[in-house]
Amino acid sequence: MDTHLQTAKPGQRSDTLLVFLPGAFLKPEEFEREGFVSAVRERDVAADVMLVDANVSYYYDQSFVQRLSDDVLAPARSAGYATIWLVGISIGGFGALTHELSRPGLVDGIVVLAPYLGRRPIGAEIQKAGGLRAWKAPEAPTDDEIDRKLWPWLQQYADPDSTGMLPRLYLGYGLADRFAANHQLLADVLPDGHVFTTEGGHDWPQWSRLWRSLLDVLPLPSFASPKTQPAAMALPA
């Protein structure tokens, strides 16, 4: 995966990294065009930003998890980043979640905006059961599709005893989004303050508004508050 790093301050890295994962057929530079990076800077968030060219082909050939681990996360940890957040849109959100499912413990937080959460029949099955808290995952799934594994993993967020072992998870989506029914199933088990919605659908104006709202509550270090300033890391020569 190709990556582009933007440091929080010229010539100096933060010890916190935000990794942006685009949706299907979207380009990483669109995060800049749509104001995601400028929103981070406007709020004095003390975090570096990495734009990742995680194109849809990695999902088709099922190499996304391996590539994200090898090309992005392992080098970031080796470079000294103490805290890493994944920020994914649509299938990028799906990728962020399935990566944590497959390689737990490599990131500290996940933000998903309008994430693809799998096939609608599985969502309908969960809805019919009364929601994610009440749903009983089949002990012997009828297929091995990743969403059959993802929903039981997401169900852990409904259990207070499990959440301490999971990365912090924040969700944003439009109420008119084509995936909104599945989003609501996940929203129902997340803590207060971890879910933001807009009236719109599956497009950049909604995602940009949601990102700005989420940035105001995410537990990220700030240059404006000395108590939360991160350790500085000099850029390599």
Image (spheres, rainbow, N blue to C red):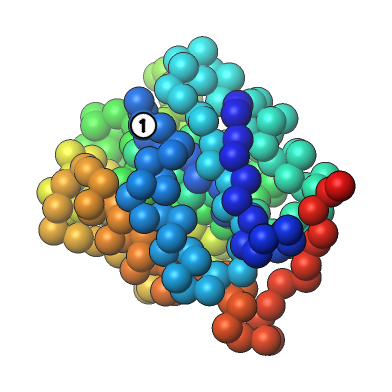
**Toward which corner of the image does residue 190 lie, by quadrant?**
bottom left
Q: As displayed, is residue 229 above or below residue 237?
A: below
Measured as percent of width and height from the top left, residue 23 is found at: 37, 35
Residue beneath label 1, please?
26
Camera-nearest residue between 84 and 183: 84
Q: Position of residue 211 (x, y in %)?
A: 37, 59
Left or right position of 62 against 236: left
Q: SS for tag 1?
A: loop
Q: Considering depth in this image, is 151 or 34 the residue closer to the camera? A: 34
Furthest residue toward top: 61
Expressed as whole percent of the image width and height from the top left, the position of residue 162 reads: 58, 59
The quadrant in which residue 78 appears is top right
| Dot 1 crowding, Cα within 10 Å, few <14, some 14–19, many 20+ | some
Q: Is residue 182 left or right of residue 96?
A: left
- The answer to whether residue 183 is visible is no
Residue occupying image coordinates x 14% and y 53%? 200
Identify the image quadrant of the N terminus.
Answer: top right
